[in-house]
Image (cartoon, rainbow, N blue to C red):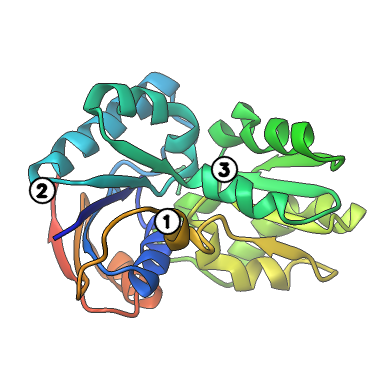
Amino acid sequence: MTNIGVFDSGLGGLTVLKELVANKKANYFYFGDSLRAPYGSRPKDLIIEFSDQIVKFLENYNIDQYVIACNTISTLATDYLEEKYNKAFYPITKSGLENALAFEGDFLVLGTQTTVESHFYKNNIEANSTSFVYETAAPKLVNLIEDGVISGEKLDKSLEEYLKIANEKHIPNIILGCTHYPIIREAIEKNLTYKANIINPADNIASKLNFIEDNKSYVNIFMSEINEKNKQTIDKILACDYKLKLKEI
Ligand code: DGL
């Protein structure tokens, strides 16, 4: 059995889990910290502390390899976690960067405040191409998504503000720099006045991971908060059987 740990501040990492389950069979253990989401505007040391608590919990399941299904945690805590747990941690930002570098033209990174302030995508894309990278922090989106708001006027209003620069400049590529955003991809496309190339860092992620596949996948989901709304969102994202358990850490 190959045990894969996948984690995020909440529901967003399920968009990564979905790609993994669809393409590589394993025993998956997911932790989503919906009770304490969003992480993206919290102080750095707290984000590292929360990530450490998540991994400490997942370590009970004999994890062979981790996927950090959160851009915010990836940019801040990957080095810390690798050093502390001496295991492989695959940050979603690595896949995001690889996916982005396959395209030409300028980019907009839509992400949390922390991810945008890290300039991870901007620095790496600009160092490896002739593209210019615009960045927009979208702090309201994770809360809305966690609350089950994945369409409608309230979401459109926020997106109109966050996509202003893209609509003004017709930026050809938009990186969904937060794993929650693929959940509202339709709303993002609806609020663009032109056709952009939307880049989901989770695309092809399974092919980038090196592990021995099992014959069947098992999906275990732990959430620090479970309610009707987030259960509905989980069902909307995942098209597979799963076991869901409440776990506060
Ligand atoms: N899904 C997380 C990410 O990719 C959201 C972080 C947050 O909770 O603000 O950055």
Q: State the image quarter where residue 152 is shown.
A: bottom right
In the rendered image, the vertical position of residue 190 relative to residue 38, given as above or below: below
In the rendered image, the vertical position of residue 17 relative to residue 78, given as above or below: below
Q: Nearer the viewer, residue 53 or 231?
A: 53
Give the labeled residue for mark 1: 12
Q: Residues within 10 Å of mark 1 (few under 14, many from 20)?
A: many
Reading the chain from its start, which is encountered first: label 3 or label 1?
1
Q: Residue at x 44, y 23 (%)?
A: 43
Give the labeled residue for mark 3: 139
Reading the chain from its start, which is encountered first: label 2 or label 1?
1
Closer to the camera: disc 2 or disc 1? Answer: 2
Q: Residue at x 47, y 55 (%)?
A: 208
User: What type is the residue that disc 2 sits on?
Assistant: Tyr
Residue situated furthest left in the rendering: 60
- Asked if disc 2 and disc 1 are in contact, CB closer than 8 Å, the reply is no
User: What type is the residue that disc 3 sits on?
Assistant: Pro
Is there any visible trace of residue 249 in the rendered image?
A: no
Q: Nearer the viewer, residue 70 or 210?
A: 210
Give the labeled residue for mark 2: 61
Find residue 203 and report its horizontal and vertical position in percent: 54, 63
Reading the chain from its start, which is encountered first: label 3 or label 2?
2
Q: Which mark is residue 106?
A: none
Q: Residue at x 37, y 64 (%)?
A: 20
In the rendered image, the vertical position of residue 216 relative to residue 165, given as above or below: below
Closer to the camera: disc 3 or disc 1? Answer: 1
Find residue 55 and report its horizontal and vertical position in percent: 22, 37
Whole-angstrom CA distance, mark 2 to mark 1, is 22 Å
Find residue 102 and report its horizontal and vertical position in percent: 72, 55
Q: Residue at x 33, y 69 (%)?
A: 21
Find residue 25 and report its horizontal and vertical position in percent: 27, 69
Q: Quadrant of the C terminus?
A: top left
